Image: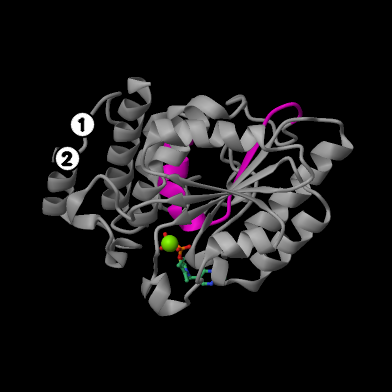
Amino acid sequence: MAELTAIASQIRRDIVRMVHGANSGHPGGSLGCTDYFTALFFKVMKHNPAFDMNAKDEDVFFLSNGHISPVYYSSLARSGYFDIKELATFRKLNSRLQGHPATHEHLPGVRIASGSLGQGMSVAIGAAMAKKLNGDDCFVFSLHGDGELDEGQVWEAIMFAAHHKIDNLISTVDWNHQQIDGTTEKVMDHFDLRKKFDAFGWIMIETDGNDVNRMVETLELAKAHSGQGKPVVILMHTIMGKGVDFMENDHNWHGVAPNDEQLAKALAQLPETLGDY
Ligand SMILES: Cc1ncc(C[n+]2csc(CCOP(=O)(O)OP(=O)(O)O)c2C)c(N)n1
Ligand SMILES: [Mg+2]
């Protein structure tokens, strides 16, 4: 399992280097969700880097909070979907790695455009229903920001999934209490998310999203809770900017690039384990 910690460190390096290289992008949520991505892509998910859009007999993942594309692209490249050298093209003109993921770029691993918040759970539910119809017993995973929950469409999807007993869906909320303009409590208070998901008929699991080994256990537990006629949500406590001390817990790092000096400081805190791109 030490290997997962090493992978997470490299992904965090990729994130800060990509955002610095483009002088734009979203490091905060990306760093906070790195342990989730590491656990999912390198341990839990049954997936094939020889990408096939139909995803027959494999698990699928949908990123709904598309602004955290740096962690997504790095995870895809590091697990073999495309060459890690392409990470250097992040947010550049004509790159397949646009600021927000899009399908028309044909980047292997990307199944939906996201960035306009609120849509990913609806798509994930559709995919989960298709898997049931096809007799495919693999899982559908989706990730959502907590600020993203301000979008009404998410709550329609939450209701729909419970009503239709979508029990092959494992949705995760990045509960970092931060969003673009401040804390979620200040911008739009969600009050008790546990009670909300419970009231909406979901199975709820709460976890520390910045402990990669715990994240593996949590995702496995979520799988064990599937098939009971209810969708499963993981409320994942994370720290925005996790791993870079001056970015931690600060919404100002939601969507800002580090300058040269800040990059150097960040990289000094993140060991290079697999080799930089
Ligand atoms: C429909 C829609 N409305 C507004 C935005 C602008 N926006 C981008 S990120 C963001 C905040 C999202 O907060 P959260 O999901 O908590 O992400 P975090 O800051 O934690 O990474 C907003 C409002 C958007 N991308 N899409
Ligand atoms: Mg947030």
Residue 52 rendering spot, x and y as whole percentages: 69, 31
User: What quarter of the picture does the C terminus occupy?
Assistant: top left
Location of mark 1 (residue):
271
Image coordinates of residue 159 in percent, x first then y, are 74, 63
Instruction: Report the number of numbered marks.
Output: 2
Residue 81, x across and y down, in percent: 53, 29
Asked whether 67 falls inside the magenta stretch, the response is yes
Residue type (three-letter) at the residue carrying disc 1: Pro
Q: Is residue 106 left or right of residue 146?
A: right
Query: Residue at 65% across / 32% down in the picture?
Result: 224
* Magenta region, residue range: 56-76
Instruction: Indicate the quadrant where residue 162 lies.
Output: bottom right
Label 1 to label 2, Cα distance in Å? 6 Å
| Contact check, label 1 and label 2, Cβ < 8 Å | no
Res 28 seen here: yes
Q: Would residue 99 be seen by someone viewing this image from the given angle? A: no
Q: Is residue 28 left or right of residue 260?
A: right
Magenta stretch: includes residue 141 = no
Callout 2: CB less than 8 Å from ligand 1: no
Residue at 63% across, 49% down: 104
Vertical comparison of 59 with 249: above or below: above
Callout 2 amino acid: Gln
Q: Quadrant of ligand 2?
A: bottom left
Q: Which of 130 and 89 is in front in this view?
A: 130
Please determine whether, in this image, residue 114 is positioned above or below residue 264.
below
> SS for tag 1?
loop
Determine which residue is flagged by label 2: 269
